[in-house]
Image (cartoon, helix red, strand yellow):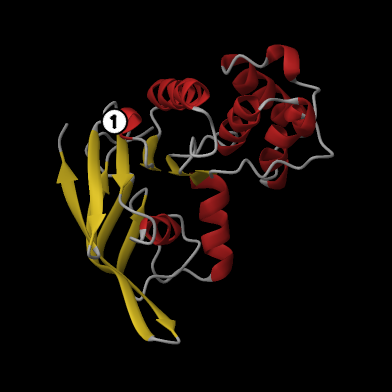
Amino acid sequence: MSDPATPVLSLRGVERTYVTDAGSLPVLKGVDLDIMPGEIVGLIGPSGSGKSSLLHAAGLLERPDGGTVTIIGKDCTRLNDRARTRMRLSGIGFVYQFHHLLPEFSALENVAMPAMIAGRSRAWAAARAETLLTRLGLAARLQHQPGQLSGGEQQRVALARALTNEPRLLLADEPTGNLDPDTAADVFQSLYDLARDTGVAALIATHNMDLARYMDRVFALKDGHLEERSF
């Protein structure tokens, strides 16, 4: 059960610098952020501003050069690789601009796979996948492979996959960036409704200002720091 007073994600002083041929390139310069259970937070900023770097640090895909990343009350900064993988599998869901579905598997199989990797039974995983896909309006598409689905349907399958293991934190990197405006609005509405229904905390990077307006809070990443924006 989520403690409504405890952040699902807490970043303190997160720093990230990349070394290039031209020298050091700092992209995160001490980022602080708390996201509470059930909160949907938007992250905006131009390409190259560090949005993906921030999501990768928050999702334990990259180690920050400084600061702390706390997820579900656990300081993950110094976890070893195996423990980080366990946290990603059980506590974090990821959605990207491109769906990254496995083309040879059906929608149901793509969504069920993370649960089976986490040790759930095939029956539990299939039932969970069917429930999520049905809620996303894909009950008639369970056995379709990704190539038989539209772009919006593929992205809804990716969203269901991200939520299969009942994560507490959802990280989305331009989840509608590859879709036309109408389809993007439909997919975002699906993401929004599922996040609200499940109480997951969500951090969503987007260029779409129309969608950002529906989020609880929006931050711009500028010069390595977060600035809260209002609409």
Q: What is the quadrant of the N terminus in the image?
A: top left
Residue 67 in sight from this viewpoint: yes
Report the front residue among 165 and 54. 54
Report the front residue among 97 and 109. 97
Q: What is the quadrant of the C terminus in the image?
A: top left
Residue drawn at the location 70% of the way across and 22% of the way down: 127
Q: Which amino acid does label 1 sit on?
A: Met
Residue drawn at the location 41% of the way across and 71% of the way down: 78
Q: Is residue 46 above or below residue 136?
A: below
Q: What element carries label 1?
A: loop
Res. 144 image quadrant: top right
Q: Residues within 10 Å of mark 1 (few under 14, many from 20)?
A: some
Q: Going by the image, does 77 lie left or right of 212? A: right
Residue at the farthest front position: 180
Q: Going by the image, does 103 lie left or right of 221? A: right
Report the front residue among 126 and 138. 138
Res. 30 image quadrant: bottom left
Q: Going by the image, does 215 lie left or right of 78? A: left
* Location of mark 1 (residue): 215
Residue drawn at the location 67% of the way across and 42% of the way down: 114
- x, y percent for residue 159: 56, 33
Residue drawn at the location 21% of the way across and 38% of the way down: 5
Residue at the farthest right position: 104
Q: Is residue 151 above or below residue 229?
A: above
- x, y percent for residue 95: 53, 42
Q: In this view, does 100 lie above or below 66?
A: above
Residue 66 in sight from this viewpoint: no
- x, y percent for residue 188: 45, 27
Q: Is residue 78 above or below residue 163?
A: below
- x, y percent for residue 82: 59, 65
